[in-house]
Amino acid sequence: MFSSMTASFVGANSTETPCDRRCLANSLVQKELFSAPQSDNCTIIVNITSIQYETLSFDTKDMKMTSRIKVNMLWNDPDLGWMQEKYKYPTILLPVDKIWIPRIVLDNAIETTMEPYTNDVQVRRDGTVVHSVVLFTMVSCEINLFNYPFVMGSCPVAINGWSQKTCALTLQIADNVTLVGGSRGEWHTRGVIKTVDSSNHVYLQVALSINPFGAVVTLILPSGLVLLADLVSFALPFEGGERNSFKVTLVLSFTMFLLILNEHLPSSGNCSPLLHYHFSFCLVCLVMSTLASIVLTRLSIDDSFLLCRRSAKPQHDSLDQEKDAGVIATQSGNLASEMASLQKIVKFLQNIDKGEKEARSKVAFAYLLDKFCFGFFIIIYIIYAIILISITRADICKVNNLDFWDDSHHKDDNFDYSYT
C-alpha cells in the first residue's frame, strides 16, 4: 500500500514543470517594480563598491572638464528576493529597464549622461541588486592658471545621491577609486582620490597638471626670441628705414602670437594667467622700441622730431645759379667778375662742408641717443625678468572649487511632511 502511494505521488509531481531561472526572472518582471524601494524611514542606501575614473578632456579656455566614470554599485530591494525552499537559484539576471535603478547626481555637473554598463542586472536571493553604470559628465572647474603653463591643480567631481526633505538616496562610497588613462592633450591626470570634507560632503578629487613643453615652444620661447631680435635690431643703421620696417614686422608677428594666446587661455577670471600681462608688456616694449627708432630717424635728418617744423630748404638752386654766374663771368673775360665768381664758389663749398658737418653731427647725436635707448631697454628687460621670477614663485592667487554645495534641503529636515 505504501509503495503504491509513493508511486502515485511521484507520478503527480512528474506532471509539474519546474521553474528555471528565466521563469523566475519573468515572475519578478511581472511585478513591475519601477518605483524605488520604500523603507520605513524613506531612505535608500546604495553602496558604491568601486569607481573607475577617466579624464576625457579639459577645456582650458572655458575651464570645463569632461570625464568618464564607471560606477559599480549594489542595493537591496526586498521585493526582488525569493525563498530558497521554493527556488534553488542564488542569482538571476533581470533586464535593466524592468526594475528601479538609482539615479546618481553630480552636484557640480554642467551636463551628465548616465548609461548602463550592461543591459542586465544581477539580482541575488536576498534582493540585493548588483549593477554598473557609466557616467559621462562635464563639470566646471576653475584652476589657478596664474603661473601657466607651470600649473598644478585639482578638480572636484561631487558624486552624490539626492535628498528631498524626509526622503533621500544615500550613497556609501568605498575608497576603491582607480584611474584609467593619464594624458589628454596638454593636461595630465596625476591621480584621483575619494575625499570627505568637514560637512561630510563626498567628492572625487582629481589632481591635474599641464605638460609645459607645448606652451613653452609655441608661446613663451617665441616671445623671448622676438624681444631678442628687437634688441639685436639696434645694430642696424636707422638711415634708409631698414630698421623701422624690421621693427614693424616684429610688432605684427607678435600681435599674431597675442591672438593665439587669447584663443587658448581665458582672458578674465579670479586668476587670469600671468602670460597675458607678459605678452602685453612685450608688445608695449616692441611698440616703444619702434617709435624710438622712428624718432631717431627723424632726428638724424632734422634738429627736431616735431611734424610742424620743416627742415631748411636745400640750396641746390643757388648752387646752379652760382655755377651759371661763374661760367658767364669766365666767358666774359672780366677779371673782377672772375674774382667775384671764385669767391662765391669758395663760399658755396664752405657752406657745403658746413652742412655736411652739421649732418654728421645730427647723425652722431642720433646714434648717441640710440645707444642710450639700447641700454635703457636692456635694463628694463633685466628688471622685468627679476620681477617676473619673483611673482611666479609667490603664491598670489587662490581658487575655491567647493562653493557649489547646496545645503538648503537640510534647513527643514526636522519638519514632518507626512500629513501631506
Image (tube, rainbow, N blue to C red):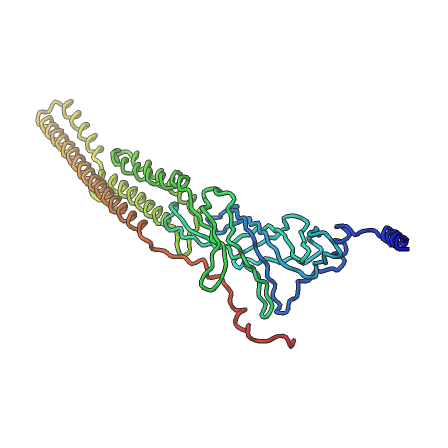
Residue 371 vs 346, above or below: the answer is below
For residue 80, side relative to residue 222 (left or right): right
Residue 123 vs 353, above or below: the answer is below
- Residue lying furthest bottom in this view? 419
Residue in the image at 20% along x and 35% along y: 315
Residue 51 x, y percent position in the rendering: 54, 51
**Quadrant showing the C terminus:** bottom right
Residue 33 x, y percent position in the rendering: 71, 60
Q: Foreground: 198 or 217?
A: 198
Q: Foreground: 387 or 224?
A: 387
Residue 142, by quadrant, is bottom left
Residue in the image at 69% along x and 51% along y: 91
Residue 189 x, y percent position in the rendering: 46, 46
For residue 351, side relative to residue 143 (left or right): left
Residue 87 x, y percent position in the rendering: 74, 54
Residue 340 vs 148, above or below: the answer is above
